[in-house]
Image: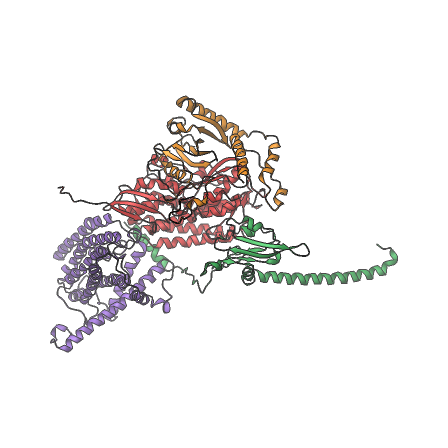
Amino acid sequence: MFGFLKGLSVTFGQMTKKKLTLQYPEVKPEWPERFRGIHQFIPEHCIVCNQCARICPTSCISLSGNRDENKKMHIDTYDINFEICILCDLCTEVCPTEAILMTDQFELATYSRDELYKDIHWLYENHVKHGNYQQLQAAKVQAAKEAEEKAKAAETEKATVEASTAGSDKGGDA
Amino acid sequence: MFSWQTQPLTGLNFLGMVIGAVIVLMVVLVVVMYTIYFERKVIGWMQNRIGPNRVGPFGLLQSAADVFKLLLKEDIVPANADRLMFMIAPIIAFVPSFMVLAVIPYTAAHVFTAGLNVGVLYYIALSSISIVGIVLGGWASNNKYSLVGGLRSAAQMISYEIPLGLSILGVIMLSGSLNLNTIVAHQATDRFGWYIIPQIIGFVVFVIAAIAELNRTPFDLPEAESELVAGYFTEYTGFRFAFYMLSEYVYVFAIASLGTTLFLGGWEGPFLPSWLWFALKTSLFIFFLFWVRATMPRIRIDQLMSFAWKVLIPVALFNILLTGALSLIL
Amino acid sequence: MADDKKEDVTEVKSEIKTGSAEAKPTASTKEAAAPTAKPASKVTPAKAAKAPQPPDPRVEQAVKQGEAIKAAIEKKLGADTVEEVTATKDIPILRIASAKWREAVTFLRDDPEQSYNYVELFAGTDYKDYIEVVLYFYSMTHGTYINVKTRTPRDEAIIPSLTPVLPGVNWEEREVYDLLGVTFEGHPDLRRIMMWDGWNGYPLRKDYSDFQNMPQREGEPHS
Amino acid sequence: MSTTLRSEEMILNVGPQHPSTHGVFRLVVTLDGEQIVDADPVVGYLHRGTEKLAEGLQYTQIIPYTDRLDYIAAMLNNYALVHTVEHALDLEIPARAEHLRILVMELNRIASHLLFLGTYLLDLGAMSPFLYVFQERERIVQLFNEISGARLTYNYMRVGGVKWDAPPGWIEKVREFVPFMREKVKMYDKLISGNEIFLHRVRGIGVITQEDALQYSLSGINLRSTGIRFDLRKNRTYSIYDQFDFDMVTAENGDCYDRYYIHLEEIRQALNIVEQAAAQIPDGPVLGKVPKLIRIPAGEYYTSIEGARGELGVYIVSDGKDKPYRLKFRRPSFVNLQILRKMLIGQSMANLIAILGAVNIVLGEVDA
């Protein structure tokens, strides 16, 4: 007879527990690192290999590029049609140079359909705003600084070597 | 003590009575709005969520916003519905729920309470008029779901009126009068204390029958969302829908205050002022109704009927027998 | 384009007949690097030239098991019931003449030492010049597992229905009727299950084109 | 002139937009008063032609489509497709990948059973369990979000293994989740199983006999509720289920209460598996040696796994190319739904919701 009393005690007990509601518009949920939101695109990395367009199950990626003067391919247009994109992340998987990646932006609702056709500028914009643009820039700056130091270190070390070889020149040209 | 019967019926006195009635109406409307808010908060807490907190500070204006929204909403009358009946039904359901409150002794000075000698009978009689409103609403909106919902609620409320009435008989036998004021007075002086103690069986039957009377879970067959898509008021929109909702919550307040008056000693209590005691006990009763709503699943229609006739009524009759025998011996 | 499909099909039929599971295709990595997919035909001859790889022991064993069941069936239902016995991996495949389809399945279910009483899969496939209906049968008592199939020509595809015998294939038969156009005689209520009744054409057939169901302006006949 | 009252049967359309039909599913019910005279299920509202689409896609491209079949247990669908392809190619899968697959599949089974408990109680009128259930499901879904990047459509498995290794600390979180969940299962048992009203609503309702279950080829919990001991993880062991000890949960009288209780019990068994798998997961690669362009040798292949709702199988006919010639999903909800009509005739309207809920169907899977 007292099954429902046990049930009542459970619900009463829940009253004291911590509440789970997240005040959504003000407080955004923070997503893990692999979260699959809307795409970001880094044109410099792209080698126009067409892998992403071919692997896409709903074929919503269309791109075109051409070969510039020193035989290197570079991308002209890159459009993703977000009406049919299912955010399955196969494109980022096959991309050899990680030109196309995903950000953690998940609010994709728009008022009109043609806003869902994102072109290369919007995707690059998204990269700058939400992608790992900062880390890439920082990495680039870091790499530049290191290269510079290495060069300087190499010169100083070459200079010392010349000094030492000049010193020991008479002892054979080791 | 101030009592309206002793006053001559002059224009001024009549005006006083009308203003008194309007005040009670306003108080009860505010109380009902905050009962709705209280319910959504309590059930929210029980389900690990916050409940309304957007409209106004801590969501206090939420139910006011709801009522206001219902006022503004378009009032649709379905095409081939029975227009006149469709409009009258909510009124028939709504008006008795307010008339019933005239009899409840809120405070010791009970200025606005009609000291009717047949208070309990008045309450029981009026509360069954609402059934007519519900069945009419179900029939008039010309929709299969509403019709089945209306018939179901009629069957349910009628079969639960009887145990409700019988469970109150025990209290009347102890207090000797139907007048709610004297019942509260007797409870103060009774040697066993409040009637909940001697009448514990009657109290349990009263609570179960009260929940069924209000069409609340676990007896909310008429507006079983998952089966009949909101039962008899499926077709109602706008303020007519608000009539039904408000009448349901006014009845929650009315039954809770009746239960407090009959079993928990009404406004009777040691230190605190009388109206505070009444408010505390009533909100305890209301909290129990919401607590049950958050926990229990729904009873099936045929189980509902057999439970009323085969379990509640015999238990209530046994309680009356027991009370009679014991009051002879003791 | 059409002939390319033709050539593929012949190749399909022959290979399915053998049904043997070749060793893993040695798709060399060099081929993957080439950006555009190489035409398939160029690849298959290379494979065929290789010596036919050793028959898979499991398939051998399954075919033997299939032969035994075929003997049992034909003892009961006459010689021409089972048209062919093959196997896929370790499951024997018996192809039964469509006329004897219901009797064979009933026999397989009721016969004590077969007692296949649990249907796992019922599927239809369009093989360009015949439609094949496949039934994966499992015996709860013996724990054995066989694949029973039958064929019917594409244009007037009629197969006796199994629903009176096994109610579990009721909706599967309706789905094969709806998507492949095979009418099952004796089915209690053969209606389209996925598409609405106004749909014409059978989507899962290889020659199905979407334009059969384009919205037509009134008066224009369907293509 | 007949003196009897002329009563007319009422045709009632339950669905396709109905709060408790678990998706877009319509049931044309012929009612005589409260008694159901006939019930004709109408499906196909959510038919997306996945099987026709799959004939034009490579195997890796089909995997995102399998997420959308039974969207409550997407990992199990992924595995069903990938399992058949690997069976056809006789690939062997690295141990770590197998363990990761078992972990995510069993966690997904727990999430799916939890959702069944929540929606079933909501159908019967109890509101709170539905919200408690989403608390636990949220923790599981966050684990999936960390490992695969998505909350519902994971697209996590690949032919030959899994797409990514578990992020650092993920296995630790799974280990912490198990005791937490065991507590919660006790709470549900206490909240629901004893409630008299719930028992009156489900005990002895929608009873399925053993030979009916076999004849209608029911699978999964519907089959085991009648007492038949058939669980593909035990009877036809696939992957590395033989390395874990868990027992098959069956009941006797095959009514709605048994189906509810087996769901609860299977969550406990799944927790055992998750605990053991998380304990013994080895290191190593997560993707086996797989050709860049997957081609299945010509022939037909069928394997099935124990999905959340029953036997979930994928039948592939291949003509040696990289795209399947024909791909058929054996969808448990579609097959289990056939017995609904037989169970409903003669019941009362209020039982309809209890019976329909207990069959535990998902419309994405019914209409694939």
Residue D274 visible from this viewpoint: no
Q: Is residue B112 above or below residue A123?
A: below
**Residue D68 as seen in the image, left or right of residue D261:** right
In the figure, the shade used to draw chain D is red
**Residue A72 as seen in the image, left or right of residue B304:** right
At x 48%, y 27%, the residue is C85
Question: Where residue A84 sits in the image (x, y, percent)?
Answer: 48, 53
Q: Quick one: which chain is green?
A: A
Specify the farthest residue to the right.
A170
Question: Where residue D182 sits in the image (x, y, percent)?
Answer: 42, 49
In the figure, the shade used to draw chain C is orange
Question: Where residue D103 sits in the image (x, y, percent)?
Answer: 49, 46
Judge by depth and name the residue closer to the eye, B275 or D157.
D157
Judge by depth and name the residue closer to the eye, D354 or D196.
D354
Which quarter of the picture shows residue B31? bottom left
Which quarter of the picture shows residue C131? top left
**What is the count of numbered marks?**
0
Question: Where residue C162 sits in the image (x, y, percent)?
Answer: 37, 33
At x 34%, y 42%, the residue is D258
Q: Quick one: which chain is purple?
A: B
Q: Is residue D162 above or below residue A150?
A: above
At x 53%, y 30%, the residue is C18
Could you tell me which quadrant the C terminus of chain A lies in? Answer: bottom right
Specify the farthest residue to the front.
C219
Judge by depth and name the residue closer to the eye, A37 or D260.
A37
Residue D139 visible from this viewpoint: yes
**Residue A54 as seen in the image, left or right of residue C149:** right
Query: Which color scheme did the rendering employ for the protein?
Result: by chain
